[in-house]
Amino acid sequence: MELIDTFFNGPILVRSFPILMRGLGNTVVLGIAAIVFGAIAGLAICLMRLYAPKPFRRLATAYIDIFRALPILVVLILIYYALPFVGIRLSSFASAALALSLVFAAFTAEVCRAGIENIPKGQFEAAATLGLPFWLAMRKVILPQAIRVVIPPLTSNCVSVFKDTALASVVAMPDLLKQATDAQALMANPTPLIGAAIIYLAILWPLVRLVGYLENRGKDQFAQ
């Protein structure tokens, strides 16, 4: 009974539920913002790495290598605590969104590069034969085919982004984890943390299953 009263206390879970829901809203908004901006930036960096002049290709490669190597927490702390020394002050939400976007963009760029390079060169040649300009061929011919290849790994990376939103609590952003820890302190019971874990599981488990489904579907299509 001590275990249940301490970690699975029903009345405390009910009292903390509205607090957790406010944090969940912030978490969802943060995750969506990071994914949208990170995906757009990642695709741009990918195209820069593949088709820009050599200095820009090297710059894109350096960006990808650096932000794939740096932990998100380090990037977040640098943005939130170091930038004010050069006169740039961002809110906790903006700092977390920027940090997640920068890292997600690096992983997205690599995934997109692999997807584009997976397309046979004959597709480029056929588009050129038809007189399509490069960027039109990329938008109409290459990217639609590459999307089918990159969707499973991109979906997996999106799941990681939503999990990493919990790091925003380090800079006092009222996300789901921060609200859960505040509720824990207020109620002197760790049950709100268990509630947050259940919410994370309820949201992310279907996405994890979706990743598995997309990966299996891709293998079946490849086998055919």
Image: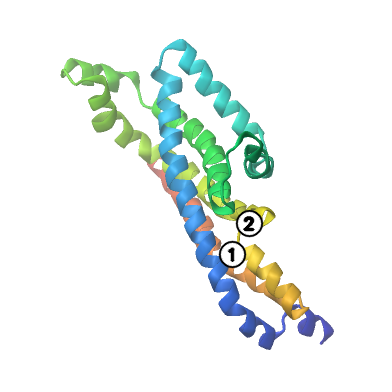
Q: Nearer the viewer, mark 1 or mark 2?
A: 2
Asked whether, in this view, residue 38 is left or right of residue 10, the answer is left
Q: How is the image coloured?
A: rainbow
Which residue is identified by label 1? 200
State which quarter of the image contains the C terminus.
top left
Callouts 1 and 2 close, C-beta under 8 Å: yes
Give the residue type at disc 1: Tyr
Q: Residues within 10 Å of mark 2 (few under 14, many from 20)?
A: some
Estimate the x, y position of residue 49 in percent, counting from the top left.
46, 21
State which quarter of the image contains the N terminus.
bottom right
Asked whether, in this view, residue 159 is left or right of residue 37, the answer is right
Residue nearest the viewer, comparing 167 with 7: 167
Q: Classify mark 1: helix, strand or loop.
A: helix
Q: Measuring 36% from the left and 26% from the top, which residue is drawn there?
A: 119
Residue nearest the viewer, comparing 220 with 190: 190
Which residue is identified by label 2? 166
Residue nearest the viewer, comparing 219 with 130: 130
User: Does any portion of residue 219 appear in the rendered image?
Assistant: no
Q: Residue furthest front?
A: 87
Estimate the x, y position of residue 26 in percent, counting from the top left.
52, 62
Residue 200, image quadrant: bottom right
Give the residue type at disc 2: Ala
Q: Measuring 56% from the left and 78% from the top, which residue is drawn there?
A: 18
Mark closer to the chain start, 1 or 2? 2
Q: Measuring 32% from the left and 33% from the top, which residue is drawn there?
A: 143
Estimate the x, y position of residue 13 in percent, counting from the top left.
65, 81
Estimate the x, y position of residue 10 in percent, counting from the top left.
67, 86
- The CA span between labels 1 and 2 is 10 Å
Q: Residue furthest right?
A: 2
Q: Residues within 10 Å of mark 1 (few under 14, many from 20)?
A: some
Residue nearest the viewer, comparing 189 with 92: 92
- Vertical comparison of 207 with 47: above or below: below
